[in-house]
């Protein structure tokens, strides 16, 4: 199945973007053929870490989820075992965040090669060895040494990555799923503004040639299915499409 996601508030959007960049970092750390491709995602992470509100946003989102789970604990129909497991994980991550006073990205800020690359990323071919001798040096090092450098950069952001993964895992786990139909490739529904979901998820069979364009906020969301074409812009699907829709309960 092909899975698509859309955030319904800015913190969820921030976390999905972070997750996307962390996925690129994991891929580059696993591939030790060189540093060039890894410099872009690490610079993007440094941009995230330069936001003064990032740490507070992560803490506030974890606290919000913890408070929601505390309310659920009073519902006799809720399974206590997974609920307590999630509460424990949230409490532990909040403790780690509050005890760790060093700003996110501190190690990356002091890496000369990252700082030099920042000014070259917007230039076509700007990361060529002729423009960055330090990159030429690292690209000729043994794979084990390159892996050690990248792993150190990645580990320095472990707290941020673990917090991101935990929040998104809980949002996804809280989704309630239903099968819906989209006449003429369109589907929309109102949302409870008092308890709006954070995340919309769609499951489509991966054997189709269309994808969803999703928009929404705290009051309503809308989905339009678009057909991918080899040439030209995407075209709206005109037939009725059935798919699975998931809305997070948090």
Image (cartoon, helix red, strand yellow):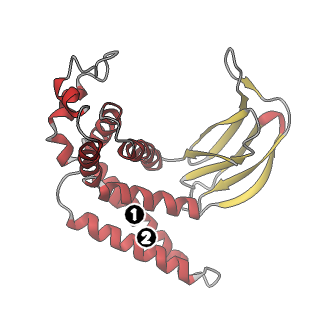
Few, some or many C-alpha atoms within 10 Å of disc 2 (few <14, some 14-19, many ≥20)? some
From this viewpoint, is residue 229 visible? Answer: yes
Q: Residue 66 carries which label?
A: 2
At 74% across and 32% down in the image, what residue appears? 209
Where residue 51 appears, as percent x and y from the top left, is: 27, 42
Q: Is residue 92 above or below residue 220?
A: below
Q: Quadrant of the C terminus?
A: bottom right
Q: In which quarter of the image is residue 236?
A: top right
Kind of element beneath mark 1 = helix
Residue at the front extreme of this rendering? 142
Q: Which mark is residue 122?
A: none
Q: In this view, does 121 lie to the left or right of 77?
A: left
Q: In this view, does 133 lie to the left or right of 244?
A: left
Say whether marks 2 and 1 touch (CB < 8 Å): yes
Where residue 198 appears, as percent x and y from the top left, is: 53, 53
Kind of element beneath mark 2 = helix
At 62% across and 61% down in the image, what residue appears? 175
In this view, the residue in front, 137 or 154, is 137
Q: How far apart are marks 2 and 1 (CA)?
A: 6 Å
The count of marks equals 2
Q: Is residue 77 above or below residue 154?
A: below
Q: Residue 62 carries which label?
A: 1
């Amino acid at each position: 199945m092909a899975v698509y996601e859309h955030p319904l508030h800015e913190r969820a959007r921030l976390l999905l973007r972070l997750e996307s960049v962390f996925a690129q970092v994991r891929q580059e750390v696993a591939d030790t053929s060189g540093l060039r491709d890894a410099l872009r995602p690490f610079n993007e992470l440094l941009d995230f870490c330069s936001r003064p509100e990032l740490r507070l946003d992560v803490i506030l989102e974890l606290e919000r989820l913890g408070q929601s789970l505390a309310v659920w604990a009073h519902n006799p129909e809720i399974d206590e075992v997974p609920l307590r497991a999630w509460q424990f994980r949230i409490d532990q991550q909040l403790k780690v965040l509050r005890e760790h006073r060093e700003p996110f990205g501190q190690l990356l800020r002091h890496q000369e090669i990252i700082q030099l690359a920042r000014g070259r990323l917007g230039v076509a071919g700007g990361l060529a060895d002729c423009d960055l001798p330090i990159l030429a040096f690292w690209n000729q090092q043994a794979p084990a040494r390159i892996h050690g450098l990248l792993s150190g950069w990645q580990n320095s952001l472990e707290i941020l990555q673990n917090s991101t993964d935990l929040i998104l895992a809980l949002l996804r786990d809280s989704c309630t799923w239903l099968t819906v139909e989209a006449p003429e490739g369109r589907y929309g529904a109102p949302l409870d503004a008092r308890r709006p979901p954070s995340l919309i998820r769609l499951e489509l069979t991966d054997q189709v040639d269309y994808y969803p364009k999703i928009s929404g906020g705290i009051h309503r969301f809308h989905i339009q299915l678009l057909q991918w074409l080899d040439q030209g812009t995407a075209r709206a699907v005109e037939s009725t499409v059935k798919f699975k829709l998931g809305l997070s309960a948090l």
